[in-house]
Structures are given as C-alpha cells and as structure tokens.
Amino acid sequence: MDKNVSQKPKVKLIGTDGNVFSLIGKVSAALKKTSQKEKAVEFAEKAFRAEDYDHVLRIIMEYVEVE
C-alpha cells in the first residue's frame, strides 16, 4: 500500500457547489487543515493549469480521498 494514500484527507464533494473554483478551494483547505500546506500549494498550481474540469477532478483525486 502506498504511504501517501493514508495521508490523503477525506473531502465530501457531493452537495458542494460544482464550480471548479469552489472545489479547488475546498480541497486546498482540507490539505491545509491536515498540515499539508506545501501539498495544498502544489495542488492549486496543478489545478489552475488543468486543461478542463475533468482534468481538475482527476487532480483532486490524486490529493484527497473523495467521499
């Protein structure tokens, strides 16, 4: 099992505003809340460079466990 998987915070996205900026903010906040500020910055940079909404969703799943 990958060590990074256990470090992923759980984030509930169902019922969240589907706006991509809202999703990025929610994931960034979850990472910061679990003392992963560097990962939050890395995530946000990748997400803002993403080509489309689906790409952002794939990036989100790399950093958090989606509920």
Image: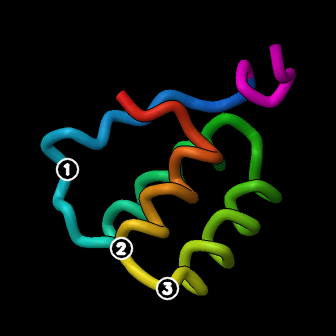
Q: Which amino acid lies under the numbered mark 1 shown in the image of this protein?
A: Thr
Q: Secondary structure at mark 2?
A: helix
25 vs 5, nearest the viewer: 5
Mark 2 packing: few (<14 Cα in 10 Å), some, or many (20+)? few
Q: Which mark is residue 33?
A: none
- As helix, strand or loop, the secondary structure at mark 1 comes to loop
Queried whether the magenta region covers residue 31, the answer comes back as: no
Q: Which residues are magenta?
A: 1-6
Residue 27, image x, y percentages: 49, 52
* Mark 1 vs 3, N-terminal side: 1
Quarter placement of the C terminus: top left
Query: Disc 1 marks which residue?
Result: 16
Q: Residues within 10 Å of mark 1 (few under 14, many from 20)?
A: few
Within-10-Å neighbours for mark 3: few <14, some 14–19, many 20+: few
The quarter of the picture where the N terminus appears is top right
Residue at 76% x, 55% y is 39
Residues marked 1 and 3 touching at CB (< 8 Å): no
Q: Amino acid at mark 3?
A: Glu
- Residue at 20% in and 39% down: 14
Residue 2 within the segment the image draws in magenta: yes
Tag 3 secondary structure: loop
- Where does label 2 land, which residue? 53
| Residue position for label 3 | 51
Mark 1 and mark 2 lie on one chain; the one further toward the N terminus is: 1
